[in-house]
Image (cartoon, helix red, strand yellow):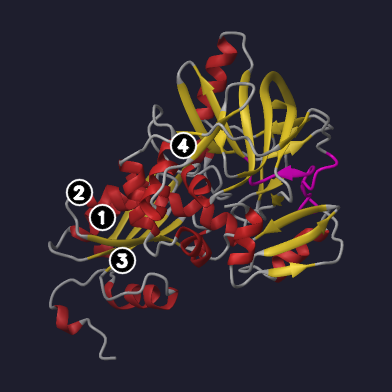
Amino acid sequence: MNYIDIIEKLPNTINIKEKVSKNLEVTKYLIKHPMNPVFFEDLDGYYAVGNIWADRKNISHVLNNSDLLKSMLYAIENPMDYEISESFPFQSTGDLNLKDLPVPKYFEGDKSSYFTSAIIFSEYRGKRNVSFHRMMVMDERRAAIRLVPRDLYKMYNDAKSHGEELKIGIVVGAFPTFLLSAATSVDYITDESKIASALKYKTMGQREKMVRLSNNIFVPLESEYIFEAKITLDLCPVEGPFLDITRTYDIKYDQPVVYFEKMHYRKNSVFHVLLSGFYEHYNLMGMPREPTIFKAVRDRGIDVLDVRLTYGGSSWLHGVVKIRKRNENDGKMAIDAAFEGHRSMKHVFVVDEDIDINNSEEIEWSIATRFQGDRDLVMKKEKGSSLDPSRYENDITTKLGFDATIKGNRKEFLKVY
């Protein structure tokens, strides 16, 4: 299914027919319609879409699945081989100019135009990896890629230690199975493409299909734009500033330079523009961490019912865990497990099964009526998220867990209506 088909299938799409500039102007439309897919028929001459996955219901709608957390957990625990397609339904060119493409500059303070929805596919010495990485456009062929100390960073440094550049494929406009799988946190040897394949099989009854690029990197058949590229041994002295998920500016870094070699695209391809720090970013970054929290709590023997990373915490720093309490210490045990399931989380709230974790008022009510600070608060100081602007040196942060579950006589704590 390509993005044109998806856009037509979704019931809440906003169509923008007039010409829109990728330089700052695109942002105004995305902010005006924060929960609606915004389809640009002329983003400086290209089809483009933003906010397409800003509403979780759109992901469920396309995948024909109402319980994505459980489906993602299944896929993480049961990776499945994908199929190799002999078909290659793309037009190709080696004559490309990154500055001509609909890569937006979203905010005045951003240093340059940025790829924000790009998924990097890589392979080195038998290890395959799929992950999101922002890229700052430097010139017609080069972009600085933001690498954090995770799998691709490790692969790049491995190649670098052998004096080699790292061949990659870059996909813009991926199917949601890959968008979700690319942000999962799994062990180094796991190929996230197999998680995507398992997720598609679980939700749609079919495995993912991949195509091989001329540089021998495998990428999804269902892609809008594909770039063959390499992460070079060169460094860009300053990548950033760039507005990140907390709606604050990330600090500047020295980062590797990516050189773009070829571009492949479908007929009527749609470029996926992702507005950083808003709901689509929240969902694609936060949703894949909810099953890992769920699993960590479940594996402690706790009857966990649901998990949500909240929009107020940028779907990264604040989480809510709903449990069916069977033992008095389940609440605090769930807190410890949740922090292990998502180590960037700063505050977690554990609530009973009668609380709607999608309703911030109900969560606050449970804290107001079922929580005592001297008894129910868990505090620990340890490494947290580099995205938290209030963090201490070396990303150390003070984490708080709120056990807002019922203690004592249950009947005394239940709502009358």
Q: Earlier in the sequence, mark 4 or mark 2?
A: 4
Q: Is residue 387 above or below residue 140?
A: below
- Tag 1–tag 3 contact (CB < 8 Å): no
Q: Is residue 278 magenta?
A: no
Which of pointers 4 and 2 indicates the residue nearer the eye? 4
The amino acid beneath tag 2 is: Arg
At x 76% / y 61%, what residue is drawn?
40
Residue numbers of the magenta segment: 99-118
- Tag 2–tag 1 contact (CB < 8 Å): yes
The amino acid beneath tag 4 is: Ser
Relative depth, front residue between 8 and 74: 8
Q: Residue under circle 3?
A: 373
Q: Is residue 103 magenta?
A: yes
Residue 102 spot, x, y in % from top left: 79, 48
Q: Residues within 10 Å of mark 4 (few under 14, many from 20)?
A: many
Marks 4 and 2 sit apart, C-alpha to C-alpha, by: 28 Å
Marks 1 and 3 sit apart, C-alpha to C-alpha, by: 17 Å
Q: Earlier in the sequence, mark 4 or mark 1?
A: 4
- Tag 4–tag 1 contact (CB < 8 Å): no
Q: Earlier in the sequence, mark 1 or mark 3?
A: 1
The amino acid beneath tag 1 is: Ala
Q: Residues within 10 Å of mark 3 (few under 14, many from 20)?
A: few
Marks 4 and 1 sit apart, C-alpha to C-alpha, by: 30 Å
Residue lying farthest to the bottom in this orientation: 417
Which of pointers 1 and 3 indicates the residue nearer the eye? 1
Q: Residue under circle 4?
A: 193
At x 18% / y 71%, what residue is drawn?
407
Q: Residue under circle 2?
A: 300
Q: Is residue 280 above or below residue 397?
A: below
Residue 161 spot, x, y in % from top left: 56, 11
Q: Residue under circle 1?
A: 334
What secondary structure is the magenta-colored segment mainly?
A: loop
